[in-house]
Amino acid sequence: MAAGVVYGGELTFSVLITCFVAASGGLIFGYDIGISGGVSQMKPFLEAFFPKVLRRMADAKRNQYCMFDSHALTSFTSSLYLAGLVASLAAGRVTRSLGRRGTMLAGGALFFAGGAMTGGAANLAMLIAGRMLLGFGVGFTNQATPLYLAEMAPARWRGSLTLGFQFFVSLGILIANLVNYGTARLTWGWRLSLGLAGAPALIMFVGAFFLTDTPSSFVMRGKADLARAALVRVRGPSADVEAELEDIARAVEAARGREEGAFRRLFAVREYRPHLTFAFVLPLCHQLSGMMVLTFFSPLVFRIAGFGSNAALMGAVILASVKFGSLILSTLVIDRYGRKALVIAGAVIMVVCQVANAWIMGAQGGKSGETPLPRAYGVALLVLTCVQGAGFGMSWAPLIWVIPGEIFPLEIRSAGQSVSVSATLGLTFVQTQTFLALLCCFKYATFAYYASWVVAMTAFVLVFLPETKGIPLESMGSVWERHWYWRRFVGDGKRVQASPTM
């Protein structure tokens, strides 16, 4: 089917409920992102597992940027993402054999077990083991859920419905920060914060039981009748279900002979060069914006900037709330103005705020952060950080899940999504393991460091990423064939004229 041709149908109540329930898997990832930074600055938690950090905090003469610089403390956060990296590499094969829904169920069960273990941890080894179980759950869920949403959503509304995953990620971050703020005054509050990770896992696990698998997944497993029933259910009576099913079956048949060795083909076959490039570039853009590690460690960064413990936690709550609100805005515009418009707007906002924050902390806080920020500058720092979060929340926060879910051809879709999720989790591991050391080394210039990456990565994306708004998944190859650069790799590059807007 040619690009731009649609199958008709409505935005049915069934597809809305289906995507809403599936997207709730984002609560798992979001809750963990939000919970670890707040727990890491709770005194009872540090006394139990990281007493050296407490002693360093008590030494007021030390460099303020270095008081949380502990590899053991960062391992508490980063171990989850190392496990998630391993799980996501295996998840591609699991997704093909069990289906998208089955993989989501497995991820929810693993995350629930990890939450129980970390909440009841008696020593550091048990704490890290629980975090790794959480990571396995995240790896499976982050692999399957974006694929599920992309394959279930009608092309016209795919961007907005796929954003549901990031909607729940942001909601999970907000809930986690609110939980941290409420439990910080309890000596056992850190156990409650960590143990409640089982709640979002249970929500997703139970919800997934009531979902059908995607039509593509059914066809891949030889269940055409179930695929047709799933399409009728989510597309409505006015849709041309047979035409869409025929295109899905054709895509599956073309992919079937090539799905074995999908990882090898993704890396070795020339026509998949653009897909492989963006499987790595998109996670780089997401991580090197600096906003993810700031989300993880925002309570610690606010403490370094002179905020008290409770004020730092409240600052994290405000930041999470702003990011959540900005995501709602991106949901309203992504399918109207496209993906690139969000990239440009988000980049401008982030760079301005990062440079301004670097100046405030350097000029007003002293070289080593030894001078408490004046109240007005502290408020300005919080406001700028929130505006920066809004820029991220409307651009790379959702796009890291929307774009990879739609650009890969069916024969390498599971493998491509697996590589993209693995790259995201691998970079998250590196970032969380090194951020506090980077902050200790670069001090206030850390913000400018990330701003320079935002400029470089945004320029690359604007030049080399084609717009995917409104293109059916089965026709996505045409956008690469029309691109001025990638057409030399995809197709023969002669039949299709390059479009200057791509």
Image (cartoon, helix red, strand yellow):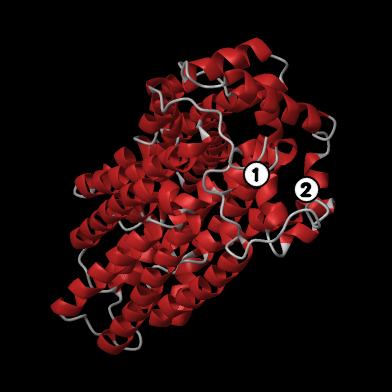
Q: Mark 1 sits on what residue?
A: 476
Image coordinates for residue 259, horizontal then vertical, percent: 79, 34
Q: Which residue is mark 2?
A: 266
Picture coordinates of residue 20, whole percent (x, y): 40, 30
User: For residue 406, which numbered disc appears in the image?
Assistant: none
- Indicate the quadrant where residue 405 lies: top right
Label 2 residue SS: helix
- The residue shown at (45%, 38%) is 157
Q: Residue 12: x, y in percent? A: 40, 23
The amino acid type found where label 2 is placed reads Leu
Residue 85 visible, this orientation: no
Q: Residue furthest left?
A: 375
Task: Decide which of 173, 350 is in the foreground and name it.
Answer: 350
Type of amino acid at the residue the image marks with label 1: Met
For the C terminus, the image quarter is: bottom right
The residue sitting at 55% across, 19% down in the picture is: 231
Q: Answer few, some or many: residues within 10 Å of disc 2's Cα (few below 14, many 20 plus, some between 14 and 19).
A: many
Q: Quadrant of residue 388?
A: bottom left
